[in-house]
Image (tube, grey):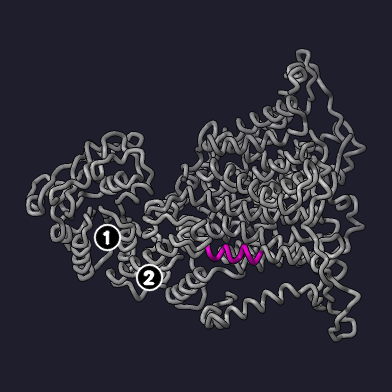
Amino acid sequence: MNFEFFFNNLPGLTITGLAFGAIYALIALGYTMVYGVLQLINFAHSEVFMYGTFAMLWAVMALGGAGASGVELVGILLASLAAAMVMSALIALFLERVAYRPLIKRNAPRLIALISAIGASFVLAELMGLRDRVAGWFGLDDDLAPYVDKARINNSIAGVVDAPRWDIAGVSVSSIDLLVIFSAVAMMVVVDQFVRRSKLGKGIRATAQDPETASMMGVNPTRTIQMTFLIGGLMAGVAAFLYMLKIETTKFDVGFLLGVKAFTAAVLGGIGNLRGALLGGLVLGVAENWGSALFGTEWRHVVAFVLLVVILLFRPTGLLGESLGKARA
Amino acid sequence: MSRFSLGTHSLPSVSTLPKPVKIVLWISLALLAYALPLLEPPFISTPGVDFGGVLFVVTVYMLVALGLNIVVGYAGLLDLGYVGFYAVGAYTAAILTSFHANWPLLLALPFAVLASTLSGVLLGWPTLRVRGDYLAIVTLGFGEIIRLIAINTEWLGDSRGISNIGRPPSLELFEIPHLNWDTGVPLLDFNDTTTFIEFGVLDQIPYYWLGLTVVILVLIADKLIKDSRVGRAWEATREDEDAAELMGVPTFRFKLLAFATGAFIGGLAGALFASRQSFINPLNFLLLFSILFLAAVVVGGQGNRWGVLVGAFLVAYLPQRFREFDDFRVLVFGLALVLLATLRPEGLFPPRRTVRAKQLEQELDELEEGTDGEEKTHA
Amino acid sequence: MPDARILEVDQLTLQFGGLTALDNVSFDIKEGEILGLIGPNGAGKTTCFNAITGVYKPTSGTIRFNGESLAGRKRFQITQSGIARTFQNIRLFPTMTALENVLVGADAQHTTGIVSALFRLPKHRREEIAGHDLAMELLRFMGLAKQADELAANLSYGDQRRLEIARAMATQPKLICLDEPAAGFNPQEKRVLMDLIRKVRDRGFTVLLIEHDMRLVMGVTDRIVVLEFGKKIAEGAPAEIRDNPAVIAAYLGVEEEDAS
């Protein structure tokens, strides 16, 4: 165990951990809301996120991000943020319509819904990973070459954004990390307020607690469910944008690992609990970073899986307890 | 709306035939199965890939499907980490026959199976009190933890893997010729033979025979266990765990037993696979295999041992028969999972009980709607 | 011994969060009797059942079965030691046949495990035959012999209720708890059920019965315990209970409806 390295770099490790954690939190929001309303683990939410990263990537490529700077670059980045949010939202809505709605209508058993979710996850991931072949079927592989090439390896926008590092109280901090943490917390607050105060938000909470009564009170269950998926998708899009700013690369299968970690964050905070998603994400991000420093980077992912298994076994209600819907045994 | 039904009343029921006839039928079927790679049938044979090898992989998937069927289909426990048991069996066989010792495979096999069964009990003990979908995620976590430990541990060969895994002992007794269809007419080809019984590198057919034998044994064991208090306890637990417990079924014990039995079979499959491959590394145990295994069970018809054999056959054979298909196999089987879940969750060959329940449901629907097959929304 | 107490409920209290579902309830059940447990909706009758069968853990108080406390026992152990039940909302195993449902009950007293089953050891053979015989006999007793191979989900409502009783009886209990077995029956079916309950008692079982239908309760029980808002408000023979002012008050207005 590398204690020396750990203690020497503790502040830096913590900040970076919080940044990762913020990204997990934004993705976790999608898991926690869908589970709160439907008691369904949206396994394919990881692909909602992944498609967002590609939308951001393609937007930057298409708008000439590599050569831009200053205000032009900021504009391109904002456009790519919008692209990511729109793409993720669309994938989320598509998922709801195709993979889940037929099952929800039939009151299908949980096992079946989970199977559909898993299948959908793999279909979406593989479609992205085979996009060069798919484009080839339509004869578009040449025209779309820069977008569909390298389908199964890393796709990068490295070097596009040259973010300064700042020295805060003797610690070298990446401005991107600070941006990520700030944005994530801000978005979570926005969603939290929306769910608490807006009519749609109240509808979501009502449906989560008692779908039949809610619908008798005039809440449209289908629209509510769509709205839940939409919000989760939009947040995943923001997460995708921030992820690309920080990591600068993506790949068709990047969703799986991030999805599991985000789900861990959701459970850690208390599934169905929006604030729990934020807390869980930040805790996981920091724990992972610390663990990586202490045990070696190769054990980084194991930390998340072990934490997941441990919480589900010993405190499945999470740190803040379940909240959006009632706890169902 | 069309409900394509492989209804039991359209085929003569096998179970109504007299016993001696049934035994002759089963034996004939078994003999045909053993002879299949020797016959080299034109449309079924896989071009470019050793047919015997493909059939061996099919038997491995069949074993896995049978084991997972016990966990998912009989006991109703969603296990997304079944590949973990498979990996434990494979790695145990590997380290005992190659990496850290030099045991003969037949000696290592029982230990491989013991190790996987133990891992099933260890995994089940804390996790089986967790509710349905959480169990799925915990088992998924377990499968991944196993793989990550394997990748990062030098004692397990880390990412380089383990090679030179032991083979079953060979006895060169006699040669069996294959059939040759080049002239359009089946002829015995004495240049293309399989040695009975040599577990070599080029000819996979003896491995297939070994795998097939194990599948048959497991099938028999499955039937014996299912038609007993154990099988009933699993079904009752799956249908209504709380009611089962109140009817005197020690549900936790039986759930653990299901896990252990599934792990036993999974480990056996993994050990056989490792032996034939002769070389394993963590890439053989990715999550996507758990998904393919699950697809075999769900597509075939969970709860129906014959259905899952068909499912295993499809999942293992199709990508080998249609090579271009291989790149798309995860996509196709993922799609199959979604389509089946949304349209026909009972699978292609659901167990008889599900068919009967659905038939009644259909009749009731038609009575209530007054029309034919209009979709009814349940409250 | 005619007056032996098979079940002793002693100051049973059950609290959920802020709600007191049962408040210091005490009563005994004598061996071989049919005891009725009645009360308006929400009185705590099913909660009482759940406490006796181990579904809920009492907040305080004890339950003794044949002299021994049930505290800390797992549910399946309680069933194996002799308390069986049916459910208010039928909980059969839907895709198992009627026979298989009853066999599961019979299995409560069996110990065949995977080894016995796999190798078809004598214990397995013995228990299968015994279980099969018991199950078919119970199905005949309930008039369900012809439906032995029907899926439980496909049976008529009345048949399902009777199947649940058969399944409970198959566990070879000493005390059998019936939770509203007549719900949804017409008067004719209720008369048949009353007869059936008496026959069950005559076979040697002790019966604890929750029911809303006053006529049925008055007609078939030996003694009655009345609950209201979690408290016991009366106990005694049917004739006494019928004229008890506290009981009448508790059921004010409800009695006419339920006496149909």
Say which quarter of the image contains residue B48: bottom right
Residue at the far top in the pictured view = A169
Q: At x 71% / y 23%, what residue is drawn?
A: A14
Which contiguous range is marked in magenta? B215-224
- Determine crowd level at label 1: few under 14, some 14-19, many 20+ residues with C-alpha closer than 10 A: many
Residue B193 vs residue B56, the one in the foreground: B193
Label ID, residue C181: 1
- 2 or 1: tag closer to the N-terminus: 2
Q: How many marks?
A: 2
Please name the residue shown 85% across and 44% down the image. A155
Where residue B65 appears, as percent x and y from the top left, is 64, 60
Left or right, B246 with reference to B123: left
Give the vertical position of B40 relative to A275 (above or below).
below
Q: Residue at x 64, y 43 (%)?
A: B142
* Callout 2 crowding tier (Cα within 10 Å): few <14, some 14–19, many ≥20: some
Question: Would you identify the image quadrant in which residue A177 lies?
Answer: top right
Which quadrant would residue A66 be assigned to in this image? top right
- Residue B207: x and y, percent? 77, 63
Callout 2, which amino acid? Answer: Leu
Parent chain of label 1: C
The residue type indicated by label 1 comes to: Pro
